[in-house]
Image (spheres, rainbow, N blue to C red):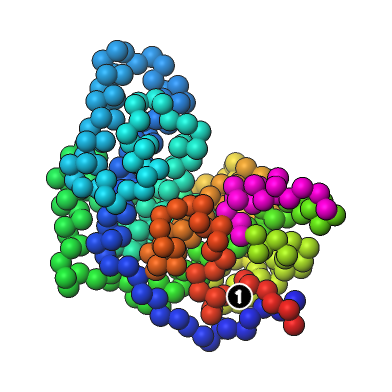
Amino acid sequence: MAFRATRFLRHAFTPRPAFELALRASCLQLVLARWGLETAALMGMQGEATANDSARKERAVEAIASAMYESGLDDHMTEAEKSMLDRPYRTWQYDDYQYGDHWESLGVLQWLLGRQHQIPAYYNNFDRANVFRATGIQPAQPQSIAQFVDSFMAPQQHLNVDQNLLQREIDIAEAWSWRARAQALLQLRAEIARTEQGHDQAPLQEAMRAKHIPQSLKKIAKELPNTIPAAARRAFERGIIDGLENDDFAITVELKEGKDQDGRPATTTVPYTHLDSAHHDAIRKIADARFMAFAWSVDKLDQWDQDKMAEITSINPIVSIWTPQDE
């Protein structure tokens, strides 16, 4: 099994117009504002709230839904997003709460729009408070949505992102998405083996769908113990990942004790594979959400639908080092 030797090939991406990204970012921010209220209620943070507090939050929920319609964002929301905003307070279902993963998508869109200076390492989240403030949108105030979107509506307004920098960030997103999917496949190898012996494929297909893993990647599962080290070394050699640890993607973690010379918590690096399943899942969600934002932004994903990410193996196969091919 070999990897495409494409180190010197490049593909010019054409991002969607800036105003489209601004509209999508606005949609995400409204739903994430509602997500915050629903998550607080779910976690019991309002257990001691007064009747006035509950009434105030219900009015906030209604104001967010009204802002969607008054600003015209309802024409740009997905059906699922509109449904989430239209539902009464505290009636969300389990799947609705997964929308919180899109804080990372919103961060990427803001980076593309020049509202974030950098994209954090893929084992760290964007600062949500910073992401929320960066647009200037007040979810209950439709005029603030219009002001944000209008700032990107001028015909001469284009994304001011260097093509080489965009290429690099897409390569990084793709690398971490691949590594996250590879880890999920490692955990599914026993199930894959059972299907190859003629057992029902439905449980495996559902597990892969839930983690947005393309069915086409199933064929590389057996080779992953060899493929992961090879991919990690190539990614490090190309500067796509910053560190290599035991022939795997290096993850920086804080130590429970000790400080560095600046007084911050001391850190060390560990191989990706040494993390526990909860941390694997957290990194996968970060990678999935950022990869989705990039895929949609350069029109590789035709609509904002996370389920469709299971169809995306690579944003740019021309430069991909992740897609194996037979020698």
Q: Which residues are magenta?
A: 198-214
Q: Is residue 248 above or below residue 197?
A: below
Q: Residue furthest bottom?
A: 8
- Camera-nearest residue between 57 and 205: 205
Tell how many labels.
1
- Camera-nearest residue between 210 and 137: 210
Residue depicted at x 46% and y 36%:
97
Provide residue 172's location: percent of width, then percent of height.
Answer: 51, 67
Residue behind mark 1: 321
Q: Is residue 293 above or below residue 323?
A: above
Task: Identify which amino acid the numbered label 1 is placed on.
Answer: Ile
- Please state, as top left, top right, bottom left or bottom right, where the N terminus lies in the image: bottom right
Residue depicted at x 32% and y 71%:
161
Provide residue 274's location: percent of width, then percent of height.
Answer: 70, 52
- Camera-nearest residue between 249 and 41: 41
Q: Is residue 30 above or below residue 5?
A: above
Provide residue 83's location: percent of width, then percent of height.
Answer: 36, 38
Q: Is residue 149 left or right of residue 172?
A: left
